[in-house]
Image (spheres, rainbow, N blue to C red):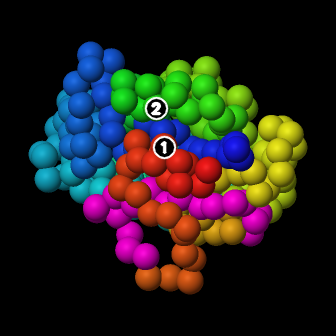
Amino acid sequence: MKTWCPLLNRLPAHDLERSYEDRQGRSFPPDRQEKLLFSRETGELLKSKLNLDDDTIRSICDKFKLKLLCESPDRPPGTSQDDIRMCHWTESIAETTGSSAASDLASQCYYLWKNSRLELLCLTPEVRDLLRQLRGRYKLLLLTNGDARTQREKVEAAECEEFFDAVVIAGDHAEQKPFPSIFQLCFSMLQVEAQDCVMVGDSLDTDIQGGVNAKVRATVWIHRADGSELDGPVKPDYTVPSVLDLPAVLAQLQ
């Protein structure tokens, strides 16, 4: 019987499964979480410091989110991602209010947003049970793109390392997904061949294309109902609505 080694993309709590719980076990959908992060913590700070109304605060937060989406992976030497994102807050406040904000206010906004985000990175009981089940039969590796320090903080916040044989943060290496070299590193770490592996992820451009480039046995696309449609050249071998459906896919590959 063939044993497949799933390569899981990013964090099951944040990116694969897209379901969250806070530390008290309350569950929130992603759109609700975004509102909680901005309006409750950061919004209250902006209101108390600048005496702004709710619409103005919402505009500042929307500008910040847009800057995140447009953020370049390349940074000036000696500049951290924290530095860049504090600058996003400074610019968002200035562009909305017409006046520059004190650097300490932008810093407070950033760390409130960041820490609130990390607090939500908690694996649901269902995902924890799934990973335990899979680890009993397969080698599991978590592969994530992104800034090394930021992704490491997410991994630690989600407390998920215990469920994986290895965790690879591509930001520590010369190339990230979808380049084959980062996948070849993963194969080497697990001591397996590409054809022994299944790539699981929610990004067609990096996860699924990367799996194709690396010639893995199969690719599994986690496609949420509110996600992007399959209308490009990248075609996954399997499409499922949730990472919880992965065991059924692996059973078909036996």
Q: Residue at x 60, y 55 (%)?
A: 253
Residue 51 visible in rendering: yes
Residue 178 visible in rendering: no
Q: Provide the residue span drawn in magenta.
A: 213-230
Badge 2 density bin: few <14, some 14–19, many ≥20, Cα 10 Å: some
Q: Residue at x 50, y 64 (%)?
A: 238
Disc 1 and disc 2 in contact, CB within 8 angstroms:
yes
- Circle 1: element type: helix
- Out of 27 and 199, give the one closest to the viewer: 199
Q: Position of residue 113 (x, y in %)?
A: 38, 35
Vertical order, 37 against 66 (above or below): above
- Out of 137 and 72, give the one closest to the viewer: 137
Total count of labels: 2
Vertical order, 13 against 30 (above or below): above
Q: Which residue is mark 1?
A: 247
Vertical order, 91 against 139 (above or below): below
Amino acid type, callout 2: Leu
Amino acid type, callout 1: Pro
- Out of 236 and 45, give the one closest to the viewer: 236
Q: Quadrant of residue 156?
A: top right
Q: Which residue is mark 2?
A: 130
Question: Of tags 1 and 2, which is closer to the observer?
Answer: 1
Q: What is the magenta segment's predominant secondary structure?
A: loop
- Out of 123 and 63, give the one closest to the viewer: 123
**Residue 227 part of the magenta segment:** yes
Q: Position of residue 140 (x, y in %)?
A: 66, 36
Q: Position of residue 50 (x, y in %)?
A: 23, 38
Q: Quadrant of residue 225?
A: bottom left
